[in-house]
Amino acid sequence: MASLSEAKAMGGIGSVLVLLTPVPSVGWLLGIVGFILTLIAIRSISVIVEDRDIFNNMVIAIILAIVAVVVAGLAIIGAFLAVIGVGGFGGMSAGVPPNLQQGNWVAFALAIIPGLIAVWIMLIISAVFLRKSYSSIATKLDVGLFGTAALIYLIGAITAVIAIGFILILVAEILFAVAFFSIREKETAKNPTLPA
């Protein structure tokens, strides 16, 4: 069984690596490694504090986020194909389909908006489960910064339709890293009968 100090290190390093996702070339790889380390840390904390819901809520949040990304991709492809028509690639000029050359961007927007709204709703629900997970960690480990970061993340997800939302999510990710590194090495007061 992992110790709290191992979870602290994995979660902190993982959160920092997630922040490096935008780095060109290797950023995506750093982000994936960071994401996995953070997930392992959350699983360890869930076991240590004997609260399965911490990990279960995080898994639900992750599944919803992955589904949202897939739906976003399908919405973009579907809208593009709806505007150009399945056989419409033959008349392209300079790589731009004829319908879009003629200013059919309104039809494109109308085709994609319902899909993006669905994605936005799924990301908000995902953020709600993420907040539940981190709020439980905040309570169990007595590190309030987890709860604060989770609330900022949720507000960021809700306001993601405007630029401020992405800034708030970035701030939340930074706070998650700080929160992991703020975990005290000893078991918290939730198990006061344990020997010192």
Image (tube, rainbow, N blue to C red):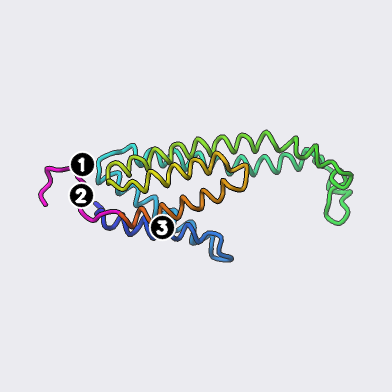
Q: Please determine whether, in this image, residue 187 is positioned above or below residue 139.
A: below
What residue did someone put label 1 on?
190
What residue did someone put label 2 on?
187
Given contact means CB atoms under 8 Å apart, are the residues at marks 1 and 2 in contact? yes
Q: Residues within 10 Å of mark 3 (few under 14, many from 20)?
A: many
Tag 1: amino acid:
Lys
Tag 3: amino acid:
Gly
Given contact means CB atoms under 8 Å apart, are the residues at marks 3 and 1 in contact? no
Q: Nearer the viewer, mark 3 or mark 1?
A: 1
Residue at the image position 69 percent from the left and 43 percent from the top: 76
Which residue is most to the bottom? 25
Residue at the image position 36 percent from the left and 48 percent from the top: 145
Residue 189 in the magenta stretch? The answer is yes
- Residue at disc 1, secondary structure: loop
| Percent coordinates x, y for residue 178 in the rendering | 38, 56
| Percent coordinates x, y for residue 150 in the rendering | 43, 44
The magenta-colored residue range is: 183-196
- Residue at disc 3, secondary structure: helix
Q: Residue 115: which quarter of the image?
A: top right
Tag 2: amino acid:
Glu
What is the spatial separation of the Cα atoms under label 3 and label 1, in whole angstroms? 26 Å
Q: Residue 53: which quarter of the image?
A: top left
Asked if residue 56 lies left or right of residue 159, the reply is left
Asked if residue 14 lies left or right of residue 66, the reply is left
Name the N-terminal-most of marks 3 and 1. Answer: 3
Please tell me the numbered disc located at residue 14. 3
